[in-house]
Image (cartoon, rainbow, N blue to C red):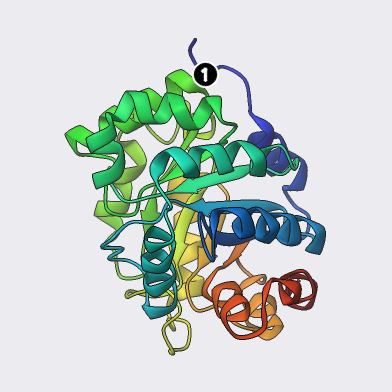
Amino acid sequence: MHFTTMNNLGTLLSESRGKKPLFMAHMIAGYPTIEDSEKVAEALVKGGADIIELQIPFSDPMADGPAIAVASEEAIKAGATVAKSLSLLKKVAALGKPVAVMTYVNIPFRYGIPKFVKSIADAGASALIVPDCPFDTQEGQTFFDSCKECGVYFVPVVSPGVPKERLEQLASAGGGSSSGGKDSRGFVYCTSRQGITGANSKFAKELFDFVKELKQIFKLPIAVGFGVKSKEDVAELAQVADIVIAGSVFVNAIKNSGIGHVEPLVRTLM
């Protein structure tokens, strides 16, 4: 079945265009435990998150800062596996919000990319984010084709400082920004700066101009994340982003105060 209609994320993006930005909340499958991570998802949804980003824990999460890296390690130690993450994904998707699965390329590569994509699609995923796999690689093309076949958006990840020529290459890879881009990508994930998640640094000075450039090149909604810790951060990014993403702040809240603080934290940030 080729992807010819929008999934629930596509519908949400279409309905929200021109309105206030959406909020995507990041969580880790299996943190603090598989059972408790289901409660985390429920809290994020009850708090009002529009999209849930579910990360499958990996032993070497290169784009993640200490908070998420340590949480991923703890999740793995607590018994989190790809199979258990997929079972959790099904439960999270059943909560009614679009779910974007985030993982590193090693996991689906070992699993078998087409098989992995079909598995997350069958479990209810609407999008797939693989930060260490560019579109214009052999693996990236396999992801792109598999996602398109299964009705899942394959989301490109970019950072401020990437040259315009490179952005145009990424926009044209896998089908082109003008030929089905909206049907195959959903949105573009833009990190607020180069570096890792949750780091203590302000947003890149050129971020706003970069996001505007992305919108022109990709013709897609732009999601911005990394370093979002407060409602002030959300408000600042909301000036330019179509989707604001927060993750480490929830991991820290769970670690320091417990899952009961997640729902009110979402409300505070939004």
Instruction: Write down the quadrant of residue 171 in the picture.
Output: top left
- Residue at 70% x, 39% y is 14
What residue sits 45% from the left and 45% below the top? 218
Q: Is residue 242 in view from this perspective?
A: no
Q: What element carries label 1?
A: loop
User: Does 267 sit left or right of 167 as displayed?
Assistant: right
Disc 1 designates what residue? 3
Residue at the front extreme, as displayed = 78
Left or right: residue 154 versus residue 13 is left
Image-based side of 238 in relation to 84, left or right: right
The answer to whether residue 190 shows anywhere in this view is yes
Q: Residue at x 38, y 50 (%)?
A: 103
- The residue furthest top is 1
Which amino acid type is marked by label 1?
Phe
Locate residue 71: give its quadrant.
bottom left
**Residue density around tag 1, few if under 14, some if 14–19, many if 20 or more, within 10 Å:** some
Name the one closer to the observer, 211 or 146: 146
Q: Which residue is pictured at 54% across the width and 66% down the height?
A: 32
Can you say whether 132 is above or below 70 in the image? above
Whether residue 111 is situated above or below residue 105 in the rendered picture: above
Image position, residue 21 (x, y; %) = 71, 60
Tell me if residue 71 comes above or below residue 170 in the rendering.
below
